[in-house]
């Protein structure tokens, strides 16, 4: 995918990315939205400015002020600096907002967002506020639910489903969907034996739903871009990321933003049904 950091949100749900390079300054609030609980953000320059300021041809006081502003913003976001070595600094997002809500000055910017739909991202402008994490009962509890380790995580019931936040999707339906796509992919292997041989490295699922097609492919030498059409009845992209998979939103009446000849195999199930009235 190709994208430009500007005024629009990234086309991914909230709490979806585990690690990300930080881009000061306004885009940092969008990174607060997309980073998962306890997610990691890393930043290069102006870190270590006292060593490089002459090569950068920047005044020491300007670089110091720039880093001080970054450090101050990180504190107001309730991020904790976990490391600084050489030209790199790393901050960590909290697992919940209990201590943050208790300690932060409510009169200081940025404020906590009022939005009830933090996952909404397609053609949505960035917000100058902190995306709240789901409620937690203790400072140690992971807001929204903890995630398992890979590859078991790909088949475990995602927290969004166990919390009942995806309308009409239950744990039983999730398990049934896994079984359905495991059987279908088993048949795909008979039709396309090269699937298991690395012939098709880059695969796209144009209508990923719960990501079960991609999960059934995890033991093959491929990676799958899971696309959730913005016109889908239910937004399931957050579930896909909680499974440890990757994906994006897309309106298939528009071009997909990527390089030519990126994908070796395109998988489409039920795509035309979504757009039959368009």
Image (cartoon, rainbow, N blue to C red):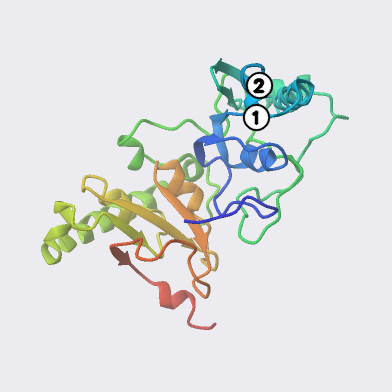
| Quadrant in the picture for residue 43 | top right
| CA distance separating discs 1 and 2 | 9 Å
Q: Nearer the viewer, residue 111 or 101?
A: 111
In the image, residue 274 lies at what x, y percent? 47, 74
- Sequence-wise, the earlier of marks 1 and 2 is 2
User: What residue appears at the point 64 percent right and 35 percent down from the top-left corner?
Assistant: 133
Q: Nearer the viewer, residue 259 or 82?
A: 259
In the image, residue 113 lies at what x, y percent? 75, 42
Q: Is residue 125 left or right of residue 198?
A: right
Q: Nearer the viewer, residue 168 or 218?
A: 218
User: What residue appears at the point 34 percent right and 65 percent down from the top-left corner?
Assistant: 261
In the image, residue 145 lies at what x, y percent? 51, 33
Tell how many labels: 2
Mark 1, residues whose alpha carbon is within 10 Å: few (<14), some, or many (≥20)? few
Instruction: From the image, tell me which residue sits under label 1.
Output: 56
Q: Nearer the viewer, residue 109 or 234?
A: 109
Q: Is residue 122 left or right of residue 67?
A: left
Q: Identify whether 226 is placed above or below 113.
A: below
Instruction: From the image, tell me which residue sits under label 2.
Output: 49
Q: Identify whether 249 is placed above or below 164.
A: below
Q: Is residue 33 left or right of residue 77?
A: left
């Amino acid at each position: 995918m190709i994208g430009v950091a500007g005024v629009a949100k990234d086309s991914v749900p909230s709490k979806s990315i585990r690690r990300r390079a930080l881009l000061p300054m306004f885009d940092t609030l969008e990174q607060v939205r997309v980073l998962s609980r306890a997610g990691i953000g890393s930043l290069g320059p102006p870190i270590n400015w006292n060593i490089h300021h002459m090569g950068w041809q920047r005044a020491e006081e300007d670089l110091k002020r720039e880093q001080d502003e970054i450090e101050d913003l990180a504190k107001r976001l309730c991020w904790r600096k976990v490391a600084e070595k050489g030209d790199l600094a790393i901050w960590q997002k909290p697992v919940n907002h209990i201590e943050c809500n208790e300690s932060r000055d409510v009169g200081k910017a940025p404020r906590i967002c009022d939005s009830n739909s933090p996952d909404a991202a397609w053609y949505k402008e960035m917000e100058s506020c902190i995306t709240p994490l789901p409620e937690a009962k203790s400072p140690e509890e992971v807001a929204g639910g903890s995630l398992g380790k890979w590859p078991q995580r790909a088949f475990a019931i995602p927290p969004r489903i166990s919390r009942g936040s995806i309308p009409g999707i239950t744990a039983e339906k999730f398990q049934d969907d896994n079984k359905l796509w495991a059987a279908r992919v088993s048949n795909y292997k008979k039709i396309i034996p090269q699937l298991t041989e690395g012939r098709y490295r880059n695969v796209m699922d144009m209508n990923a739903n719960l990501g079960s097609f991609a999960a059934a492919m995890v033991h093959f030498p491929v990676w799958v871009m899971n696309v959730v059409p913005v016109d889908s009845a239910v937004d399931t992209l957050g579930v896909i990321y909680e499974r440890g998979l990757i994906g994006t939103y897309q309106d298939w009446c528009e071009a997909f933003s990527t390089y030519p000849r990126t994908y070796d195999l395109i998988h489409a199930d039920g795509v035309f049904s979504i757009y039959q009235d368009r």
